[in-house]
Image (spheres, rainbow, N blue to C red):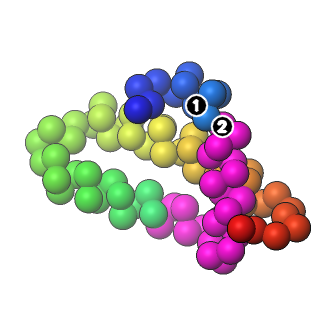
């Protein structure tokens, strides 16, 4: 479980590789913003009043950090994606 953005350093190579692996699904960079909107909406609906502005901001910051790492991987050239 990630409880802090500082922990992303330890997982960054895995997250970049996950982004690289998404090449085989033809994922486009603009789709990350759409996914963030969809996931945020689901969280807001499921958590209701517990989805506070502070939690929304924390979620958005975490998503942005992870998406940035995945986008780095997505843009990496690859010989073959298994």
Contact flag, marks 2 and 1 (Cβ < 8 Å): yes
Q: Residue beneath label 1, please?
A: 8
> Which residues are the magenta region?
12-34
Whether residue 73 is visible here, answered yes or no, is yes
In the displayed structure image, the side of residue 72 where residue 66 appears, left or right = left
Residue drawn at x 58%, y 50% as measured from the top left: 67
Work out how far the residue at label 2 is from the one at label 1, CA to CA, in angstroms.
6 Å
68 in magenta? no
Secondary structure, mark 1, is: helix
Whether residue 28 is visible here, answered yes or no, is no
Residue 35 position, x and y percent, is: 45, 63
Query: Alpha-carbon neighbours of circle 1 within 10 Å: few (<14), some, or many (≥20)?
Result: some
Residue 27 position, x and y percent, is: 62, 72
For the N terminus, the image quarter is top left
Residue 6 position, x and y percent, is: 56, 22
Residue 82 position, x and y percent, is: 71, 68
Residue 78 circle label? none
In the displayed structure image, the side of residue 49 where residue 77 appears, left or right = right
Can you say whether 24 is above or below 78 in the image? below
């Amino acid at each position: 479980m990630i409880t802090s953005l500082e922990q992303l350093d330890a997982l960054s190579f895995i997250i970049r590789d996950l982004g690289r692996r998404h090449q085989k699904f033809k994922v486009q960079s603009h789709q990350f913003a759409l996914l963030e909107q969809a996931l945020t909406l689901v969280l807001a609906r499921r958590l209701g009043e517990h989805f506070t502005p502070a939690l929304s901001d924390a979620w958005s910051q975490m998503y942005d950090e992870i998406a940035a790492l995945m986008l780095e991987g997505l843009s990496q050239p690859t010989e073959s994606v298994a």
